[in-house]
Image (cartoon, rainbow, N blue to C red):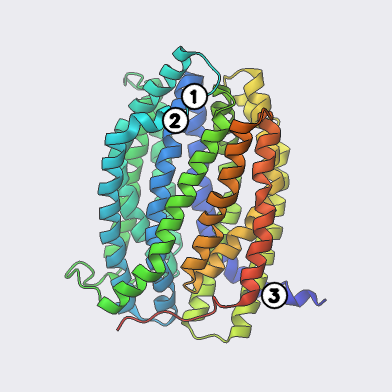
Amino acid sequence: MRLNRYLGNKQFYKSTMMVALPIMIQNAITNFVGMLDNIMVGQVGVAQMSGVAIVNQLLFVFNLCIFGAVSGAGIFTAQFAGSKDHEGVRYTFRFKILTCLVLTAIGSAAFILAGEPLIRLYLTGEGTPEEAQLFLDYGQQYLRVMLFGLLPFALTNAYSGTLRENGQTMVPMISGISAVLVNLVLNYVLIFGHFGFKPMGVEGAALATVISRYVELAVVAVWTHTHKERVPFIQGAYKSLRIPMALTKGIMIKGMPLLVNEALWSSGMAILNQCYSVRALEVVSAVNISSTICNVFNVCFIAMGNTVGILVGQALGAGKSEEEVRDLDRKLIVFSVLFCLIFGLALAAVSGFFPQIYDASQSIRDLATTFILIAALMMPFHAYTNAAYFTLRSGGKTLVTFLFDSCFVWTVCIPLAWCLAHLTGIPIVPMYFICQTTEILKCFLGGYMLKKGSWIQNIAVKN
């Protein structure tokens, strides 16, 4: 077995990291500040932290719906960018903007009308009614303010996604860094009431996040519109709403499964966490603590997955041969798994320390530590499945990715978690471990789909 079949040369790793590193840095800083945000709210109280965690789980569904919509059109954007077709990129950008506006309206309506019952779904575990009511009250306070941040979040995704697919990864990173710095400062000022401001608690945390999202949108949009020579697609982007019917149809056919996939996958994750919460209210807090630090480390496979999608998509759009595309993808996947193995070891190393930062009971801290160790063990497997997902998506096989991703969650993970939660008395730790190890089965499924090679196709047509 030749190593050069799986390992690239110096230029390969340099070009890969030029794409991956800015995405990784942006996501890492965002999640790191999110972690500090979480810790600050946790210092106010466990009930406040848990209420915010529940709402963020619900907002996660909206966020991934936006991601799915932008990514669906982004498949075409990457291939148009690879063939230097600026007009095609412009059309896909318009599609992203319009779709984001529609989804924001739908998401806002859903949270306004059904916010309270959705939060209550997580409050059925063992605990006092007083605790559950506090979780609900703080969650509703947080959600009311966060609604104002949905639109800038959606529009930022449309701009940043298009820039990345055109090779401009630094600008989204800078805008993200600007946003998180603003968020961090405002968290300190508004949550605790420094510099003459009154303490606002969870509402202060939400307001800081909303303001930072407008900052992020301002940075990325202003740069895009003032650097038209660097990103020609923006020239005349808003002069018309026209998108060729063939391209619209193509994006809908290829992109709709991706949007539905993200909606079902994220809602599936929310249901999984709801199944865990059936055991006890303290599980909500422990899952929140563990996911906070895990999100910081998960940037490795998230960034590598995005890199796989961008580089493989550009290779397909540039008309590379099947052998060249397969070779590129294989080396990217191996690099992703090895890279994330290192991150997994680092995550395991901090598993005992991180939960101690929180003002929570020792039982919650111990539970969080165990969850972190399980997540660290599964990280290389997540790296492989995530890279496989983005590979399949890069060639427009969105129906296949739908079956691979969200269908797997809804037909395997959720039934398993529900049965363990409601039909057995198995403790939360083995229950959590069993549910997480389903990712290993998904690796075999991903390997089979990659080997078939039906994803190797150029779909960038706009007639």
Separation of marks 3 and 1 at Cα, in angstroms? 54 Å
Q: Which residue is mark 3?
A: 9
Relative horizontal placement of residue 177, taking residue 294 as reference (left or right) = left
Residue 305: x and y in percent read 56, 61
Vertical side of 177 occupied by 89: above or below = below
* Mark 2 vs mark 3, CA separation in Å: 51 Å
Which amino acid type corresponds to the residue marked 1 in the rendered image? Answer: Thr
Residue name at image x 66 percent, y 20 percent = 363
Task: Give the labeled residue for mark 1.
Answer: 124
Q: Are marks 2 and 3 in contact (CB under 8 Å)?
A: no
Which of 179 and 282 lies nearest the eye of the viewer? Answer: 282
Q: Secondary structure at mark 2?
A: loop
| In this view, the mark in front (2 or 3) | 2
- Distance (Cα) linking label 1 and label 2: 7 Å
Amino acid type, callout 3: Asn
Q: Amino acid at mark 2?
A: Leu
Depth order, front residue of 431/84: 431
Q: Position of residue 85 (x, y in %)?
A: 36, 81
Q: Which residue is mark 2?
A: 121
The percent position of residue 9, horizontal first and vertical second, equals 69, 75
